Image (tube, rainbow, N blue to C red):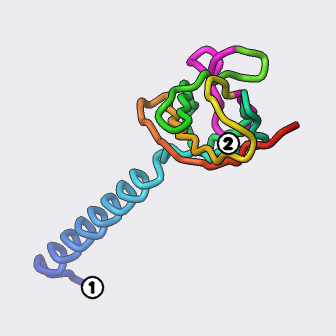
Amino acid sequence: MKLSIETVILLVVTIAVVGAVAAWGMGYIGASMSGTPDFTPQVDQCLKDRTYLKIKNLATVDIVKVEVKAGDAPCAVAYIDGSPVNASKPIKSGDMVQLEVKGYVANVGDRITFRIECTFADGKVVAKDVAAIVRSI
Protein backbone atom coordinates (compact mmCIF):
# COMPACT_ATOMS: atom_id res chain seq x y z
CA MET A 1 0.00 0.00 0.00
CA LYS A 2 1.41 3.32 -1.05
CA LEU A 3 0.62 6.50 0.84
CA SER A 4 0.48 9.74 -1.00
CA ILE A 5 2.40 12.74 0.29
CA GLU A 6 -0.89 14.44 1.18
CA THR A 7 -1.91 11.52 3.37
CA VAL A 8 1.43 11.50 5.21
CA ILE A 9 1.28 15.27 5.79
CA LEU A 10 -2.31 15.01 7.03
CA LEU A 11 -1.32 12.18 9.39
CA VAL A 12 1.65 14.14 10.80
CA VAL A 13 -0.45 17.31 11.27
CA THR A 14 -3.22 15.33 12.98
CA ILE A 15 -0.76 13.71 15.40
CA ALA A 16 0.81 17.12 16.14
CA VAL A 17 -2.58 18.74 16.84
CA VAL A 18 -3.71 15.86 19.08
CA GLY A 19 -0.40 16.02 20.95
CA ALA A 20 -0.69 19.80 21.43
CA VAL A 21 -4.26 19.54 22.71
CA ALA A 22 -3.28 16.73 25.10
CA ALA A 23 -0.30 18.71 26.41
CA TRP A 24 -2.45 21.81 26.94
CA GLY A 25 -5.11 19.74 28.72
CA MET A 26 -2.60 18.08 31.04
CA GLY A 27 -1.04 21.47 31.81
CA TYR A 28 -4.44 22.97 32.56
CA ILE A 29 -5.43 20.08 34.83
CA GLY A 30 -2.05 20.15 36.57
CA ALA A 31 -2.25 23.90 37.17
CA SER A 32 -5.78 23.68 38.55
CA MET A 33 -4.76 20.96 41.04
CA SER A 34 -1.48 22.50 42.17
CA GLY A 35 -2.10 22.96 45.86
CA THR A 36 -5.05 25.22 46.51
CA PRO A 37 -4.39 26.73 49.95
CA ASP A 38 -7.27 26.13 52.32
CA PHE A 39 -8.04 25.31 55.93
CA THR A 40 -11.05 24.54 58.10
CA PRO A 41 -11.50 26.42 61.40
CA GLN A 42 -13.62 25.08 64.25
CA VAL A 43 -14.26 26.61 67.68
CA ASP A 44 -14.00 23.96 70.40
CA GLN A 45 -14.68 26.19 73.41
CA CYS A 46 -15.09 29.95 73.74
CA LEU A 47 -14.59 31.37 77.24
CA LYS A 48 -14.37 34.93 78.62
CA ASP A 49 -10.58 35.07 78.51
CA ARG A 50 -9.58 32.46 75.89
CA THR A 51 -10.85 30.33 73.05
CA TYR A 52 -9.74 26.90 71.92
CA LEU A 53 -9.76 26.59 68.18
CA LYS A 54 -9.03 23.69 65.85
CA ILE A 55 -7.54 24.26 62.43
CA LYS A 56 -7.24 21.55 59.78
CA ASN A 57 -4.79 22.22 56.96
CA LEU A 58 -6.46 21.10 53.73
CA ALA A 59 -3.65 22.37 51.48
CA THR A 60 -0.68 20.54 50.03
CA VAL A 61 1.70 23.03 51.68
CA ASP A 62 2.30 23.85 55.36
CA ILE A 63 0.70 26.73 57.28
CA VAL A 64 3.58 28.82 58.64
CA LYS A 65 1.64 31.63 60.35
CA VAL A 66 -1.78 32.04 61.98
CA GLU A 67 -3.24 35.41 62.96
CA VAL A 68 -6.57 35.81 64.74
CA LYS A 69 -8.69 38.89 65.32
CA ALA A 70 -11.75 39.10 67.57
CA GLY A 71 -13.72 41.84 65.86
CA ASP A 72 -11.01 44.38 65.04
CA ALA A 73 -8.73 43.50 67.96
CA PRO A 74 -5.69 41.30 67.25
CA CYS A 75 -5.33 38.31 69.55
CA ALA A 76 -2.43 36.18 70.72
CA VAL A 77 -2.56 32.73 69.15
CA ALA A 78 -0.35 29.75 69.96
CA TYR A 79 -0.28 26.00 70.26
CA ILE A 80 -1.52 24.66 73.59
CA ASP A 81 2.09 24.43 74.81
CA GLY A 82 2.49 28.18 74.21
CA SER A 83 4.71 28.01 71.14
CA PRO A 84 3.70 30.05 68.07
CA VAL A 85 2.81 28.69 64.64
CA ASN A 86 5.82 29.51 62.46
CA ALA A 87 8.09 28.02 59.81
CA SER A 88 9.98 25.95 62.40
CA LYS A 89 6.74 24.57 63.88
CA PRO A 90 4.16 24.73 61.05
CA ILE A 91 0.79 23.08 60.68
CA LYS A 92 1.64 20.31 58.24
CA SER A 93 -0.49 19.44 55.24
CA GLY A 94 -3.44 17.28 56.35
CA ASP A 95 -2.90 17.90 60.08
CA MET A 96 -5.49 19.19 62.54
CA VAL A 97 -4.16 21.11 65.54
CA GLN A 98 -5.67 22.84 68.54
CA LEU A 99 -4.69 26.45 69.18
CA GLU A 100 -5.35 28.76 72.12
CA VAL A 101 -6.51 32.31 71.39
CA LYS A 102 -6.16 35.02 74.07
CA GLY A 103 -6.30 38.79 74.27
CA TYR A 104 -9.95 39.72 73.80
CA VAL A 105 -12.58 41.01 76.21
CA ALA A 106 -16.00 39.34 76.32
CA ASN A 107 -18.84 38.47 78.66
CA VAL A 108 -20.76 35.23 78.95
CA GLY A 109 -23.43 35.14 76.24
CA ASP A 110 -21.58 37.50 73.86
CA ARG A 111 -21.21 36.44 70.24
CA ILE A 112 -17.68 36.91 68.92
CA THR A 113 -16.61 36.66 65.29
CA PHE A 114 -13.03 35.54 64.90
CA ARG A 115 -11.16 36.37 61.69
CA ILE A 116 -8.51 33.72 61.12
CA GLU A 117 -5.75 34.40 58.60
CA CYS A 118 -3.40 31.57 57.66
CA THR A 119 -0.22 32.18 55.72
CA PHE A 120 0.99 29.18 53.75
CA ALA A 121 4.58 28.21 52.95
CA ASP A 122 4.09 29.32 49.34
CA GLY A 123 3.19 32.85 50.50
CA LYS A 124 -0.56 32.66 49.91
CA VAL A 125 -2.86 34.01 52.62
CA VAL A 126 -6.37 32.69 53.24
CA ALA A 127 -8.79 34.28 55.73
CA LYS A 128 -11.99 32.83 57.15
CA ASP A 129 -14.49 34.00 59.74
CA VAL A 130 -15.94 31.80 62.45
CA ALA A 131 -18.44 32.88 65.10
CA ALA A 132 -18.76 31.63 68.68
CA ILE A 133 -20.83 32.38 71.75
CA VAL A 134 -18.93 32.92 75.00
CA ARG A 135 -19.74 30.23 77.56
CA SER A 136 -18.90 29.84 81.23
CA ILE A 137 -17.02 26.84 82.52
Residue 78 occupies quadrant: top right
Q: Residue at x 63, y 37 (%)?
A: 93
Image mark for residue 1? 1
Q: Secondary structure at mark 1?
A: loop
Tell me residue 53's x, y (percent). Answer: 71, 37
Residue 80 seen in the figure: yes
The quarter of the image holding the C terminus is: top right
Is tag 2's residue or tag 1's residue first in the polypeptide sequence?
1
**92 above or below 2?**
above
Instruction: Judge left or right: residue 12 versus residue 60.
Output: left
Instruction: Judge left or right: residue 82 versus residue 1.
Output: right
Instruction: Judge left or right: residue 94 versus residue 69.
Output: right
Q: What are the residue bounds of the magenta stretch?
A: 83-100
Q: Residue at x 83, y 39 (%)?
A: 136
Q: Amino acid at mark 2?
A: Lys
Q: Secondary structure at mark 2?
A: strand
In the image, residue 40 lies in the stretch drawn in magenta: no
Tell me residue 7's x, y (percent). Answer: 17, 80
Tell me residue 6's x, y (percent). Answer: 11, 79
Depth check, front residue: 37 or 11 = 37
Q: Nearer the viewer, mark 2 or mark 1?
A: 2
Mark 2 — residue? Answer: 56
Q: Amino acid at mark 1?
A: Met
**120 above or below 79?**
below
Q: Residues within 10 Å of mark 2 (few under 14, many from 20)?
A: some
**112 above or below 97?**
below
